[in-house]
Image (cartoon, rainbow, N blue to C red):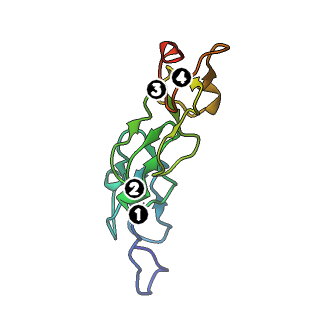
Amino acid sequence: YIGADGTECTACEGGTYKINTGTGVCAACDADKYSTTVAATAAATCKTCPAHTLSAISSDELTDCTCVEGFTGANGVACTACPAGSFKDLTGDGACTLCAADDYSTVVASADPAVCLPCPAFTFAVEGSNELTDCT
């Protein structure tokens, strides 16, 4: 709780906590952590976001944890790597983008569209190809 001495106190909001009594401010949960607890009194109430996700400081909901680049999934759950033949260059719950037809990529969890390499001359591959041998 926070407030001036002798006045009514206000609970620290979710995503924050206050360890000591008395005047002072609520501390923010670190980036990549969240807390839904109102009136939290310990940093331990700030939980770590699921695997391959991130969040801003003071996050107050599990769904504030969003997938990092190269990974996909719903907000608030562990994200999965984009498979070879694709990439994702944005954070959030978006889908992986397939390499274009006549390109391929063997890289898993890529955030860089440049991993999609062109097939050798006079060979072709379908969209999302994940091996050089797909170029025929």
Q: Are marks 4 and 1 in contact (CB under 8 Å)?
A: no
Tell which circle, 2 or 3, labels the residue nearer the N-terminal end: 2
Disc 2 secondary structure class: strand
Q: The disc labelled 1 sits on which kind of residue?
A: Asp
| Residue placed under numbered mark 2 in the picture | 34
- Residue 72: image quadrant is top left
Of discs 2 and 4, which sits in the foreground?
Answer: 4
| Residue 136 picture location, percent across and down | 53, 15
Within 10 Å of disc 4 (Cα), the crowding (few <14, some 14-19, many 20+) is many
Q: The disc labelled 2 sits on which kind of residue?
A: Tyr
Alpha carbon separation for disc pair 3 and 4: 6 Å
Of discs 1 and 3, which sits in the foreground?
Answer: 3
Q: The disc labelled 3 sits on which kind of residue?
A: Ala
At x 50%, y 36%, the residue is 70
Q: Quadrant of the N terminus?
A: bottom left
Q: The disc labelled 4 sits on which kind of residue?
A: Ser
Alpha carbon separation for disc pair 4 and 1: 38 Å
Q: Is residue 62 above or below residue 31?
A: below
The answer to whether 118 appears left or right of 10 in the picture is right
| Residue placed under numbered mark 3 in the picture | 84
Alpha carbon separation for disc pair 1 and 2: 5 Å
Tell which circle, 1 or 2, labels the residue nearer the N-terminal end: 2
Q: Are marks 3 and 4 in contact (CB under 8 Å)?
A: yes
Tell which circle, 4 or 1, labels the residue nearer the N-terminal end: 1
| Residue 77 picture location, percent across and down | 33, 49
Q: Are marks 1 and 2 in contact (CB under 8 Å)?
A: yes
| Residue 6 picture location, percent across and down | 44, 85
Disc 1 secondary structure class: loop
Alpha carbon separation for disc pair 1 and 3: 34 Å
| Residue placed under numbered mark 4 in the picture | 105
| Residue placed under numbered mark 1 in the picture | 60
Q: Are marks 1 and 3 in contact (CB under 8 Å)?
A: no
